[in-house]
Amino acid sequence: MPRIFDYGELEEKDYLELGFKSGLEIHQQLKTQKKLFCRCPAGDYYEDYDAEVLRHMRPTLSELGEYDGTALMEFKTRKEIIYQLNNRNVCTYEMDDTPPFELNLEALDIALEVTLLLNCNLVGELHIARKQYLDGSIPAGFQRTTILGTDGWVPYKDRRIGIRQLGLEEDACREVSDRGHRRVYRTDRLSIPLIETVTYPDMRAPWEVAEVAELLRELARATGKVRTGIGRARQDVNVSVEGGTRVEIKGVHRIPYIPRLTHFEALRQANLLELRSELHKRGVTKQTLRSNSIEVTEALKNTAFSPIRGALEREWRVMAVGLAEFKGLLSFPLQPRRDFASEISDRVRVIACLDELPNIVHSEMMDSPLTATEWKKVGSALKAKKDDAIVLVWGDKKDAETAVGEIIIRAREAADAIPNETRQAFPSGINGFERILPGPDRMYPDTDMPPVPLSEERIERAKGRLPLLPWQRRAYYRELGLPQEIIEDLVTDKRAPLLQQALETLPLQPILAAVILSQTLKSLERKGFPTARLRDEALLDLLRRFTDGEFAREGFPDILKLMSTEDWRPGETIAKLGLVKLSDEDVREIVQIVGRVERSLDPQDLEKKWRYLMGVLMAELRGRAPGEKVASFLREVLETGT
Amino acid sequence: MSDVYKGYRGEALALLKAQGVRVWSDADVTTTRGQFTGIILPRSETADDKHIVLKLRNGYNVGITVNTVTGIKEIGYREAHYKIPEKEFPYDPRKPRVKLLGTGGTIASRLDYRTGAVIPAFTPGELYGSVPELADICNLETEKLYGVFSENMGPEQWVGTANAIGREIEKGVQGIVIGHGTDTMHHTAAILSFMVQNSPVPIVMVGSQRSSDRPSSDAALNLIDATKTAAESDIAEVMVCMFGPTSDQYDLLHRGTRVRKMHSSYRSTFRTIGDIPIAMVSRNKIITLRDDYKRRRSDKNVIINTNYEEKVSIVYYYPNMKPDIIDSLIDNGYKGIIIAGTGLGHVNKPLYPALRRAQEKGIAMYMTVQTLWGYVQMFVYDTGRDIMELGVVPGANMLPEVAYVKLGWALGQSSDLIKVKEIMLTPIAGEITEREPHNGYLIYQGGIPEVERFVSSYWK
């Protein structure tokens, strides 16, 4: 029996029983000035464009002289690919009319840091490979990619999660639309450097996948050299169950989606395996599956069902496919609101490009849009037997032919195994077919690029820059005695390495430095001061001046405001603000003068008077005298008169 | 160097020998940077001797630094053999007979996935395996004449190709396609226009700017369009068939004597200079853009004339050029010099004595323009008149490379300079035109609003 459980209904042992296995491929853009293989600026996306190029992707022969499954699928779609080019960050490299320039070494160094953090074995020499993508997402038809390290690990709970490899590669285009036989891409994102971290399938439950994804994200962010924001990091999640197949859920933008997505994919696989047993019970196997198809346009020419009426108006054909012994199985549930017919509809949508839904109707539907008479006509045209299921599809001659082929292919797969697919994620946690998973033969050497040695000197330099890892950092902050909420802020803060450097080199109170570098900067940023542009060296210089006694802690906000808006250096800013730190003697004298005058005036209540005068004095002395000194001198003079 | 260690030398070779492993060993490699498992691949002979190349299980290749290796253990051996799959090219008696002559270049090829070497596909069966559309157009026969890179094409190959064309026309083929590397395709197109005259059938040169092992290659479309032209068009001339725009839309058919490669890497690199192309060709149709082309005939009256004098050179003039450049050509026995001069066809005064010497030695000298577009006009300035006095003949609007091969061919016909001059200045295959149409020179500048409007409304 098929099983539909919502996420949350299963426990760890249930997933264990299913043989749930999951691994991650995390793509994270790097914060570099330029792109990976050309000198275009990296990072910005634009909604407008200046020119367009049309390309068709053609499958190339694999090692064994065969076409890769994905390649063939994409060829069947007969897609026209349009690339939109803007002049600002797209050049002739992105449109595949200029060979690559040298590998961006800034990107290499960042990737190297992450590879070291992942405890990988480092390669001696980088070889650039071409990884084929026939979907058009890269105009060349392949992505340039290379790996820096293999077989690393990260600690998770009481065990290690294996890292299969860390790769450095160029990002792909952004898809704008995909309708009918035309797919449109923007090329601004293309070739932005990114790292791909691939884990082994070591996660055993949906929540573990999300937790490990979070951990790896923190690890990459710890370098302070990766891009953050929507779509800057994307996860591909691989899922399989016992007896199932590795299926890739592609491009998950938010980690919190992962548990539901993996849960429902595991469920889909378990249910497809049930469906297969049922087919085998009925004697249907990959070899014995019987199917036939026939055009039924004429039989349905008076139908009231509007999608088919629309098709007839366009002079399309309606085709009927008979699947022997499939009765009742098209509505076999796989995920919430998705049954086996949904899988068929997906294939028709993606491969035959019939993307106006519904694109099929079938004989197992609860509320059939066709009348019994119409089904009867179709059934007799197909010479269908009582245990057969029927699928109807409509399209122009070529698309309808492709669709009929795909319906039969998907039905045959159901009797065989769970197909190797890349599936797209829906926000509700269910997923849909995107394409056939590429085979292993799509990697080949990039003859345009020489190998790049990974020297000991480069590795040693990278080691010198390594930040503490998130978990090491938490322990380090706890040791410093920082409060929990500041710790959590700091773990993902890009100034964290600076904090560590400051504490190691300057006689600073940890909490003071942490508050300035994390909370003060962020709060000023929220108020509109561009503190993000302050350079680490400038901030370190400012902290040094503070420890040298050039100004008091209360001066930080004003100095930082001016440094960020005016682009002034710390020394300059302190001088312009007139923040000369007063000696204790001077402070005492000022406080005494004010205190003596005020002593006899209202209010008489000492506490109120003290609070009022603190306000007056600090407005003048902020940044030049420490608040606690002013406070104690004032209390002294109010209480004793001296 | 033994084949067992393909491409390895020095330290890397010593390591493989010491560890008792070879190329194609499936091996566990232990290094100070960790353990790696994969197949030892051949190494490019131009790469250093500090690394060995491993194909890992994940499909990636990596280099392992020799001095980090502490041990290599062979756990298997998997030598790869590659060949292009062959499928029999279907024969259809109703379809025209087209001959594909190969000179080199990789119009159809497959990559050796492990080493990156390119394996050319060439027999009809191999081509059918990778470009099956060809069978819808014609019955294809192929012959590999040469296997050289474009830059290594020269008189020997030009003569051989012209003779092969003559043989095929004699055999009765309805069209000829010539696969060629793109760098010097326009030189070969020009010389074939002179060596092969009065052809009754189309002679179409074709190549690719992106090799055919790439999904985005222009090779298949170029080959399909060239074959269609050879099989179906009524243009019986030597042509170059390459991408019109960079988009996968159509090819242009350029006259062999007016075409030039104009960009080092763009797909749409070939342009007709100083005129418009003969036609546009796509999978569906051939649209002619002009009417003055030579028509297809059913006879076999082709004239093959392959006499050629190799001692010809092009001198690309630059400011401050010294006479020793010309002198060295004289001293080395050159019989013809094409000058690519500045502007309307000029060189500096210091060259005059050398030019006079060349004239006295009976060297044929012709002026062309390095601006590529436009005619030589040596009467406008005194300089021009002086240079003509020194025996340099204005070459009208012949492209420098075209004038270069034509002069070799003309000197092959006669050593009489008057006869040579007559040949040089009489258009044979459109190399000199009487008039330059206004739309023969269109290099629009990006950035100008109306140009940007145009660019944004058509596929590039």
Image: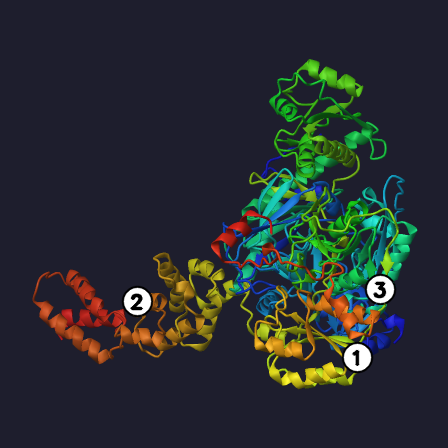
Quarter the C terminus of chain A occupies: bottom left
Which residue has dot 1 on it? B11
The chain carrying label 1 is B
Identify the residue at image location x=83%, y=74%. Answer: B16
Quadrant in which the N terminus of chain A is drawn: top right
Chain ID at mark 3: B
Amino acid type of the residue that numbered disc 2 sits on in the rendered structure: Asp
Q: Are marks 1 and 3 in contact (CB under 8 Å)?
A: no
Determine whether A638 is above or below A221 in the image: below
From the viewer's perspective, is B300 left or right of A181? right
Say the numbered circle drawn on residue B147: 3
User: Which residue matches tag 2?
Assistant: A558
The residue located at (65%, 39%) in the rendering is A181
What number is the disc on residue B76?
none
Disc count in the image?
3
* Outermost residue to the right: B171
Pinpoint residue A216: horizontal percent, then vertical percent: 58, 57
CA gap between label 3 and label 2 equals 74 Å
As measured in the structure, the alpha-carbon distance from the residue carrying label 1 to the one carrying label 3 is: 34 Å
Subunit that carries the residue with mark 2 = A
Neighbourhood count class around disc 2 (C-alpha, 10 Å): few under 14, some 14–19, many 20 upward: some
Position of residue A317 relative to residue A239, above or below, is above
Instruction: Give SS at disc 2.
Output: helix
Kind of residue at badge 3:
Gly
